Image: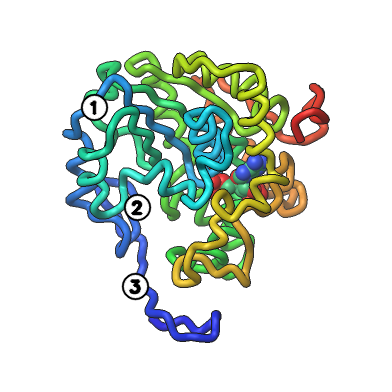
């Protein structure tokens, strides 16, 4: 496939969703054989894994963690994309770098729980699971499917709504992703954080992460982490917003990674009928999980002002 949106012809690999053991991978960037090997990876106690369903704020957590590691010094994170600072384990060839990286190793994944390294499930390393209200995920993912060349552009919102509900997307059904990871939380060193927590009070989330990772940062260093992780500042930071990524992967004319960064955008997209269907699916699937979500920016009552 050829792309000429940036004026010169770039060869785009033939990306397709490929079903593998009940989970969709993407050909050209994932290898089923390599993904199957991840469960055998040797984990160090100092390893930190960020796990998310797509569009839950992965890039945001990558930014926060790399800033915590740099003690709030944004200059030390510049020049490297978030995905270079905290790489994906499911990408082809990721094992080699994982093995040779000195501790602490930070990694990220959208994979289902069943593919995770076995040793993580025996309390080696640490897992930070970032969750987001799934209606906003759906809308964010809808836009991302036009922006990311590795994903098929949906016909329209209704078409994408169906695909998301059926789990015919990379990440599969949101409900199953969160359920499997969360219900095994006691088998791992596990921190659960929500996107809405981060919108509501980013400073408190930074405190929680620092104590989970046993990182001693001064008040000023933590303030710097927060300052350089706001939507406004990440949007204008090319290292943190994927602007430099080639148009063969992200079509910058069709969107941006830092799109809206809010809670409740789904209200601008869902019909009443879609909302009722979604609520029903949520109630049925999430019945046994003690999880609640904030669905509207108006529900966020705590002070946004100092950190937004
Ligand atoms: P929207 O498309 O709703 O704006 P991921 O990294 O998992 O793909 O998630 C991307 C989503 O997280 C996008 O959501 C993006 O705007 C949002 N996001 C990233 N950084 C953020 C920040 N600092 N504050 C608020 N939202 C952020």
Q: What element carries label 1?
A: loop
* N-terminal label among 2 and 1: 2
CB atoms of marks 1 and 3 within 8 Å? no
Q: Which of 187 and 256 is in front in this view?
A: 256
Task: Where is residue 12? Give x, y as percent.
Answer: 39, 75
Of residue 116 and residue 83, the one placed in the foreground of this image is 83
At horizontal 49% and vertical 35% (from top left) the residue drawn is 66
Q: Label 2: which residue?
A: 24
Q: Where ligand 1 lies, by quadrant?
A: top right
Q: How far apart, in angstroms, are the residues tagged by discs 2 and 1? A: 25 Å
Nearer mark to the viewer, of 1 and 3: 1
Query: How far apart are the alpha carbons under marks 1 and 3?
Result: 33 Å
Q: Residue at x 36, y 45 (%)?
A: 88
Q: Where is residue 252 in the image (x, y as percent from the top left)?
A: 59, 68
The yes-or-no answer for disc 2 within 8 Å of ligand 1 is no
Q: Distance between the residues labelled 3 and 2?
A: 15 Å
Q: Residues within 10 Å of mark 2 (few under 14, many from 20)?
A: many
Badge 3 or badge 2: first in the primary sequence: 3
Q: Name the residue under label 3.
A: 14
- Which of the 4 quarters of the picture holds residue 277? top right
Q: Which mark is residue 294?
A: none
Whichever of labels 1 and 3 marks the residue nearer the N terminus, that label is 3
Q: Give the percent coordinates (x, y) of residue 207.
A: 59, 18
Q: Residue 43 carries which label?
A: 1
> Quick one: SS at disc 2?
strand
Disc 1 packing (10 Å; few <14; some 14–19; many ≥20) = many
Q: Which residue is drawn at 54% across and 56% down?
A: 242
Q: Is residue 264 above or below residue 20?
A: above
């Amino acid at each position: 496939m050829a792309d000429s949106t940036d004026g010169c012809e770039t060869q785009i690999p033939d990306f397709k969703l490929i079903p593998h053991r009940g989970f969709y991978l993407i050909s050209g960037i994932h290898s089923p054989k390599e993904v199957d090997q991840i469960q055998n990876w040797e984990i160090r106690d100092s390893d930190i894994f960020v796990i998310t369903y797509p569009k839950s704020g992965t890039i945001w957590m990558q930014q926060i963690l790399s800033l915590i590691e740099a003690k709030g010094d944004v200059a030390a994170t510049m020049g490297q994309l978030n995905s270079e600072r905290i790489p994906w384990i499911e990408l082809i060839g990721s094992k080699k770098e994982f093995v040779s990286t000195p501790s602490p190793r930070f990694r990220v994944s959208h994979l289902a729980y069943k593919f995770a390294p076995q040793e993580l499930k025996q309390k080696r390393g640490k897992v930070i699971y970032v969750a987001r209200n799934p209606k906003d995920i759906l809308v964010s993912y809808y836009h991302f499917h036009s922006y990311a060349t590795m994903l098929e552009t949906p016909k329209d919102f209704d078409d994408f709504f169906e695909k998301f509900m059926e789990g015919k997307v990379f990440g599969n059904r949101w409900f199953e992703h969160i359920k499997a990871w969360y219900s095994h939380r006691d088998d791992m060193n596990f921190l659960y954080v929500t996107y809405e927590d981060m919108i509501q009070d980013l400073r408190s989330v930074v405190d929680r992460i620092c104590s989970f990772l046993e990182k001693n940062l001064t008040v000023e260093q933590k303030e710097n982490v927060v300052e350089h992780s706001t939507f406004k500042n990440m949007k204008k930071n090319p290292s943190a917003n994927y602007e430099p990524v080639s148009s063969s992967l992200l079509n910058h004319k069709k969107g941006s990674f830092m799109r809206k960064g809010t809670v409740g955008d789904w209200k601008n997209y869902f019909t009443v009928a879609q909302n009722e269907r979604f609520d029903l699916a949520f109630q049925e699937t999430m019945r046994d999980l003690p999880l609640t979500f904030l669905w509207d920016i108006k529900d966020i009552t705590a002070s946004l002002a100092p950190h937004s």
